[in-house]
Image (cartoon, helix red, strand yellow):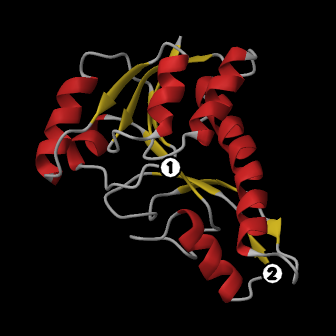
Amino acid sequence: MYNLVVFASGNGSTLQSIIDSISNHKLEAKISLVISDNPDAYALKRAELNNIDTYVIQNNDFNRIDSELSELLSSYPVNLIVLAGYLKMIGPKLIENYTIINTHPSLLPKYGGKGMHGMHVHEAVVNSKEYFTGPTVHFVNQEYDKGEIISQTKVEILPTDTIEDVSDKVQAIEKIQLNQVLKRFVNHEL
C-alpha cells in the first residue's frame, strides 16, 4: 500500500478530496497520518471522521518541530508527504529523509513565497490584472514555493471575476490536479 502523510493548517478541503479519491477507489493509497500546526484546524476533524491518526505540533521552534516530526514519522510508513494548505516552512531533516510535495494556488514562480497563500494569492493575481492563474504542484525544498514544478494547470481569469471567483476556480482545479499527481506517485511514474 502507498502511504501518505498529509500536513494541513486549515479547513482541509484538499485533504478531503484525497480521502474521497481513496474511498472511491480512484487512488490506491492510504493516509497514515494528518499533521497540523493549528489545533482548531477542521482538517483534524476530517481526519478523525475517517479514522486517520492526527498529530498537532505543540511548539513554534523551527528546529524542535523538525526533530519532533522526524521522530514521529519514523514510527509510520511514509512514501510521500503532501502539504495541503500547510503554512509553515518544512525543516531540513524532513526534506532530507522524505519526498514532500506541496500544492500552491498560483502559477509559480508568480505569487509564491512567504505570506503568499490562500486569498492573499488570489487578491494579488486579480489586482495585477492577470489573464491566467492556476494551481501548481511542486516538490518541497528549503525555500518557500521554489521546488521543482511537477504540474501546473492554467485557469482563465475573466474581467468580471472577483477574488472569490478566482479562488473557487483554482480550488476546483487544484484538487483534480493534486489527485492526478498522487496517482502518478502511486504508479511510480514520479
Can you name the residue that lies furthest to the bottom here?
128
Q: Could you say which is closer to the camera, residue 25 or residue 98?
A: 25
User: Does residue 3 show up?
Assistant: no
Tell me which residue sits at (31%, 58%) in the image: 142
The amino acid beneath tag 2 is Tyr
Q: Position of residue 5 (x, y in %)?
A: 43, 28
Q: Is residue 88 left or right of residue 182?
A: left
Q: Could you say which is closer to the camera, residue 21 or residue 108?
A: 21
Image quarter of residue 55: top left
Tell me which residue sits at (88%, 80%) in the image: 160
Q: Is residue 133 left or right of residue 53?
A: right
Q: Is residue 153 above or below residue 24?
A: below
User: Which class describes the residues within 10 Å of circle 1: few (<14), some (14-19), or many (20+)?
Assistant: many
Q: Could you say which is closer to the camera, residue 88 or residue 49?
A: 49
The amino acid beneath tag 1 is Gly
Disc 1: which residue: 85
Mark 1 lies on a secondary structure that is loop
Mark 1–mark 2 distance (CA, rounded to whole Å): 24 Å
Q: Is residue 51 above or below residue 127?
A: above
Q: Earlier in the sequence, mark 1 or mark 2?
A: 1
User: Which class describes the residues within 10 Å of circle 2: few (<14), some (14-19), or many (20+)?
Assistant: few
Disc 2: which residue: 131
Q: Position of residue 181 (x, y in %)?
A: 65, 39
Tell me which residue sits at (69%, 24%) in the image: 20
Mark 2 lies on a secondary structure that is loop
User: Does residue 178 show up?
Assistant: yes
Q: Position of residue 120 (x, y in %)?
A: 54, 72
Q: Nearer the viewer, mark 1 or mark 2?
A: 1
Residue 111 bears which disc, if any?
none
